[in-house]
C-alpha cells in the first residue's frame, strides 16, 4: 500500500512504513528544528492532552483477534497524521465523532498514521471526558 510522502507539499507516494520519498529523505526541511508539527509534540498542550487520554485509557486500545490488548498504554497515537490533518492535532475525536487519539502500548504503535483503522474492529473507542469542577 502506498501513502503520501510526509514532506509538506510533496505529492510523491511511498510504501507504507516509509515517511519520506527519496527526494525528501534526510532533507533539512525534515529536521526537528524546522518541522512545526514535530515541535508541537513538545508543547505543554500536547503533553497535557496526551497524559489525559492515556490516564482515561490506561490499557492499550488495540484490538487483536477481537480482544483488547492488556498492556499499559504508553503513547498517544494520531489515527490521522498531523502532517495531513494539522487541524486535528489536539482533537480527541474527528469531525465524525470517531476516535482520533488512541492510547497504545509501544508494541502496537505504528510508525505511520492509520486512517484505515476502524473503531470497534481495530481499536476500542477512546474514553475521554473533561471533568468540570
Image: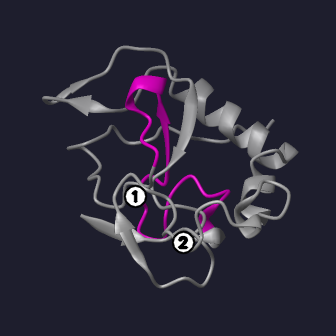
Of the two numbered discs 2 and 1 in the rendering, the one whose residue sits closer to the viewer:
2
Q: Residue at x 48, y 69 (%)?
A: 21
Write down the residue under mark 1: 98
**Tally of numbered tags:** 2
> Which of disc 1 and disc 2 is earlier in sequence?
2
Rendering coords of residue 39 (x, y %): 81, 54
Q: What range of the chain is rendered magenta?
A: 88-111
Q: Is residue 56 left or right of residue 90?
A: left
Write down the residue under mark 2: 84
Q: Is residue 45 left or right of residue 64?
A: right
Of residues 19 and 69, the one drawn nearer to the viewer in this rendering: 19
Q: The C terminus lies in which quarter of the figure?
A: top right
Q: Are marks 2 and 1 in contact (CB under 8 Å)?
A: no
Q: Is residue 118 left or right of residue 84?
A: left
Q: Secondary structure at mark 2?
A: loop
Measured along the vertical axis of the image, is residue 4 above or below residue 93?
A: below
Q: Secondary structure at mark 1?
A: loop
Measured along the vertical axis of the image, is residue 51 above or below residue 100?
A: above
Of residues 42 and 27, the one drawn nearer to the viewer in this rendering: 27
Q: Residue at x 64, y 72 (%)?
A: 87
Rendering coords of residue 104 (x, y %): 46, 31
Amino acid at each position: 500500500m502506498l501513502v503520501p510522502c510526509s514532506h509538506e507539499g510533496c505529492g510523491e507516494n511511498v510504501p507504507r512504513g516509509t515517511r519520506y520519498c527519496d527526494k525528501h529523505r534526510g532533507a533539512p526541511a525534515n529536521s526537528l528544528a524546522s518541522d512545526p508539527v514535530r515541535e508541537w509534540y513538545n508543547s505543554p498542550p500536547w503533553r497535557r492532552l496526551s497524559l489525559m487520554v492515556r490516564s482515561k485509557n490506561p490499557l492499550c486500545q488495540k484490538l487483536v483477534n477481537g480482544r483488547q490488548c492488556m498492556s499499559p498504554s504508553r503513547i498517544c497515537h494520531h489515527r490521522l497524521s498531523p502532517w495531513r490533518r494539522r487541524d486535528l492535532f489536539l482533537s480527541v475525536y474527528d469531525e465524525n465523532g470517531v476516535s482520533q487519539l488512541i492510547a497504545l502500548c509501544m508494541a502496537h504503535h505504528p510508525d505511520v498514521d492509520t486512517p484505515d483503522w476502524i473503531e470497534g474492529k481495530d481499536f476500542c473507542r477512546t474514553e475521554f471526558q473533561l471533568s468540570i469542577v
